[in-house]
Image (tube, rainbow, N blue to C red):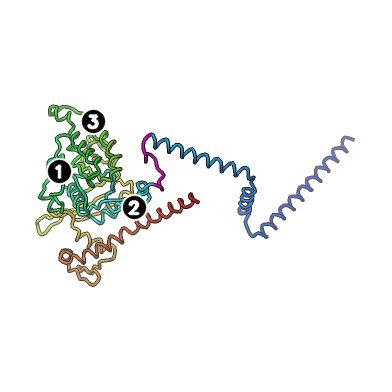
Amino acid sequence: MFRNLLVSSSIRRSLLFQHHQQQRQQLRQLRRQQQRAFHCSPVLLAKRKTADASISASPAQSIAEDSVVSNKRSAMSQALKSLESSFGKGAIMRMGDSESSKRLLGKHPCVSTGSLGLDTVLGIGGLARGRIVEIYGPEMSGKTTLALQVVAEAQKAGGTCVFIDAEHALDSAYARSIGVNVDDLYLSQPDSGEQALEIVDTLARSGAPDVIVVDSVAALVPRAEIEGDIGDMQIGLQARLMSHALRKLAGTIARTQTVLIFINQLRMKVGIMFGNPETTPGGTALKYYASQRLEIRRESQMKKGDVIVGNIVKVKVSKNKLAPPFRTASFELEFGKGINKYAEAIDLGVANGLVERQGAWFQYGEHKLGQGKEKAKSYLVEHPAVYDELYSRLRTAMLEAETTAVATDTEISDLEDAKDVA
């Protein structure tokens, strides 16, 4: 009897299993027919089911989500009013609403360096306004010359410039030969590092200067070191001085849109066996606060016969918060003249296909510039209209990529603003 019950239960289980198998096969056939009817994959069917489920969600759930969003917006509005009443208007702002913050969405204002190649590798067309810039390199590499070239370009655009000569070594005749309007240049030769940075802070708060140059960080001697005896150990005074000053200056120059340039020297670390032993004095605060750091080095010498008339320098953008860093630019620095813009125009013209070079001959459009680079430079000097046309075309061609990228970002932000309004 017990054996018969076992046999009947096993038969029942087998029948149920067969029934389930038939049901599964029927379901599979139905799914395949649905997929063929809609001409879509199982993944798309799953997405369609999810979308249908979201559409068929209860109206109460969507109303609850809308109420949460509106509550957050009202809470944010109240918080903004509280902050503005406590700290003043503009303490916090929506980036798409204020003119000052819209600058972050568009092309950043800048001051030209005087070198088209360097302006291009900087990504925005020059040194950024409202930012701290550090120019450093070995001796006789052209640091002060490059800074004076920036001053000359700012003055040509109608700007006001200040030169803080902490080294007490500025040659006014040399600055004039580069193109600086010495009569309109404001010069300060401070007695200590504290005095120099206080002058910078006062001028930056006024909002009058467009460019302030400090030459150099290594010459900013703390007052305690001046009052002490030669040979006294004053550890970390200059680094603390720079750290305290930069904390104040960073926000000030951002509000007044002043370009603050620090020229710095190089030192050698003692006992370094591996890695780069070079470092810059003044601590690490300047490295952090600087938005652009330019490393300038001499590549080779320029000679006319046996006479050295200048250097070919290479500038590396070792840090850039506004564009990709680590790009390089090379140009000629002539003694007593600064950056040779005519030689740079020829080199960049050849590189960008605007100037044809056949052997030793250079030709720009219908203009035969001459045989050899020196004659080509002389032709551009004698025909300023040709140079202006070439420079304009070069600047448009070389900065076109950056302008297109900025325009794309602006269009995206405008679309997002339109969605928010809708």
Q: Nearer the viewer, mark 3 or mark 2?
A: 2
Q: Nearer the viewer, mark 3 or mark 1?
A: 1
Query: Per the image, is 89 magenta?
Result: yes
Q: Position of residue 26 (x, y in %)?
A: 75, 53
Q: Disc 1 vs disc 2: Cβ atoms closer than 8 Å?
A: no
> In the picture, residue 255 is in which quadrant?
top left
User: Mark 2 or mark 3, which is nearer the start of the sequence?
Assistant: 2
User: Mark 1 or mark 3, which is nearer the start of the sequence?
Assistant: 1
Quadrant location, the N terminus: top right
Q: Position of residue 269 (x, y in %)?
A: 23, 36
Does dot 3 land on a helix, a strand or a loop?
loop
Q: Name the residue carrying label 1.
A: 187
> In the picture, residue 63 is in which quadrant?
top right
What segment is highlighted magenta in the picture?
86-97
Q: Disc 3 vs disc 2: Cβ atoms closer than 8 Å?
A: no
For the stretch drawn in magenta, the main secondary structure is loop
